[in-house]
């Protein structure tokens, strides 16, 4: 993902600015929202929308699922966002995204080509450093954790990562992602008694 977003200084006067968790979630939504209309699995996603889940937002913001749920509730209560569910996931729209960002996109598109190329290269470098967890010689990226979220909750994933880190013989492993996949499979069915269907429903925000 390349480019940048605009944040006005007046945001320090915003009612949720001093609420660390809520501000973090809102900033993440601004960063990930579509800056142009796009199609996704038969749906048309408008400018300012993002298709995601509470587990994914928890992963990206390093907050708990409950903290994300509370932050989204606050943002929705003051009409900062709208939330809709679909078979493809939870669709969140930043209500005033166009007001916040359209001018920014116009300026970005008018930058000299050389300047745009430098910006793109920097973003590509940052994407390669998108590490979610790292210890010893092992690491796992956010994209790999998102793959695990197809079958498991973020709590289950974090618990397994903790177990691997505390395992004295973890030096024999070469891939934290593949190790996590195997350890999670060993733990099925989960101790929480959550079925695969329920896990998927929770991921997409269809149930709490």
Image: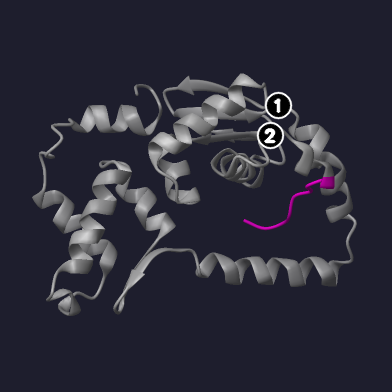
Compared across the picture, whether 155 is left or right of 169 comes to right
**Callout 1 touching callout 2 (CB < 8 Å):** yes
Q: Quadrant of the N terminus?
A: bottom right
User: Residue at coordinates 73% horizontally, 55% vertically from top-left?
Assistant: 4
* Residue neighbourhood size for the residue with mark 2, other residues' Cα within 10 Å, grouped as few (<14), some (14–19), many (≥20): many
**Residue receiving disc 1:** 95
* Residue 167: % across, % down: 14, 69
Q: Earlier in the sequence, mark 1 or mark 2?
A: 2
User: As displayed, is residue 85 above or below residue 181?
Assistant: above
* Mark sitting on residue 48: 2
Magenta stretch: helix, strand or loop mostly? loop
Of the residues tagged 1 and 2, which is closer to the observer? Answer: 1
Q: Nearer the viewer, residue 192 or 144?
A: 192
Q: Quadrant of the C terminus?
A: top left
Q: Distance between the residues labelled 1 and 2?
A: 7 Å
* Residue neighbourhood size for the residue with mark 1, other residues' Cα within 10 Å, grouped as few (<14), some (14–19), many (≥20): some
């Amino acid at each position: 993902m390349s480019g940048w977003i605009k944040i006005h200084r007046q945001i320090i006067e915003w009612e949720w600015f001093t609420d660390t968790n809520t501000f973090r979630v809102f900033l993440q939504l601004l960063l990930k929202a579509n800056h142009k209309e796009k199609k996704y699995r038969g749906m048309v996603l408008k400018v300012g929308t993002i298709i995601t889940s509470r587990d994914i937002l928890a992963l990206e913001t390093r907050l708990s699922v409950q903290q994300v749920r509370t932050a989204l509730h606050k943002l929705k209560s003051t009409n900062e966002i709208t939330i809709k569910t679909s078979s493809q996931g939870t669709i969140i729209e930043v209500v005033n995204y166009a007001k916040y960002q359209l001018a920014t996109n116009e300026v970005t598109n008018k930058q000299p080509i050389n300047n745009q190329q430098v910006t793109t290269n920097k973003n590509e470098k940052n994407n390669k450093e998108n590490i979610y967890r790292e210890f010893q010689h092992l690491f796992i990226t956010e994209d790999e954790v998102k793959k695990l979220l197809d079958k498991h909750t973020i709590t289950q994933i974090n618990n397994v990562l903790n177990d691997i880190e505390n395992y004295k013989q973890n030096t024999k492993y070469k891939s934290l992602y593949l190790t996590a996949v195997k350890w999670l499979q060993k733990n099925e069915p989960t101790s929480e008694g959550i079925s695969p269907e329920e896990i998927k429903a929770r991921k997409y925000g269809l149930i709490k």
